[in-house]
Image (spheres, helix red, strand yellow):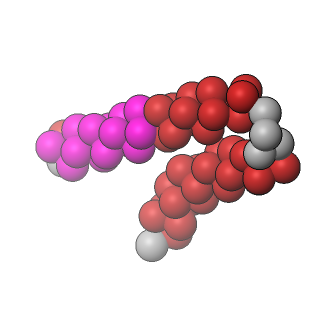
């Protein structure tokens, strides 16, 4: 259970930071790039973590 909390924390922290930046700089065009980049990175990170967990389960 503790490992799941760490995974969720790793995934949600950049999303929360990017959302804060988005709200703070709402009129800035760069904000969309930051949010899109962070979202893409989060998806990649999440899929990588899922893949690694599946590989770990198969190894056992």
User: In the depicted view, which residue is nearer to us: 18 or 6?
Assistant: 18
Q: Position of residue 58 (x, y in %)?
A: 15, 43
Q: Is residue 15 left or right of residue 48?
A: right
Q: Compared to 28, does 60 lie above or below?
A: below
From the image, give the main secondary structure of the stretch colored magenta.
helix
Residue in the foreground of this view, choosing between 1 and 28: 28
Residue at x-position 28% and y-position 38% = 51
Where is residue 29? Give x, y as percent: 72, 28
Q: Is residue 19 magenta?
A: no
Q: Position of residue 6 (x, y in %)?
A: 56, 59
Q: Quadrant of the N terminus?
A: bottom left
Q: Is the residue 13 above or below the residue 43 in the image?
A: below
Q: Residue at x 52, y 60 (%)?
A: 8
Of residues 22 and 49, which is closer to you in this image? 22
Q: Which residues are magenta?
A: 43-58
Q: Residue at x 55, y 33 (%)?
A: 36
Work out which residue is located at the far left of the displayed protein and give it.
58
Residue 21 can be seen, yes or no = no
Residue 46 image offset from top left, x and y in percent: 41, 43
Instruction: Decide which of 10, 1 is in the foreground and name it.
Output: 10
Q: In the shown orientation, is residue 53 left or right of residue 36?
A: left
Question: Image height check: is 22 above or below 35?
Answer: below
């Amino acid at each position: 259970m503790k490992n799941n909390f760490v995974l969720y924390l790793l995934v949600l922290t950049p999303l929360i930071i990017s959302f804060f930046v988005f709200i703070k700089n709402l009129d800035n065009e760069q904000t969309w790039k930051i949010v899109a980049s962070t979202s893409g990175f989060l998806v990649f990170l999440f899929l990588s973590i899922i893949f690694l967990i599946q590989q770990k389960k198969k190894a056992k």
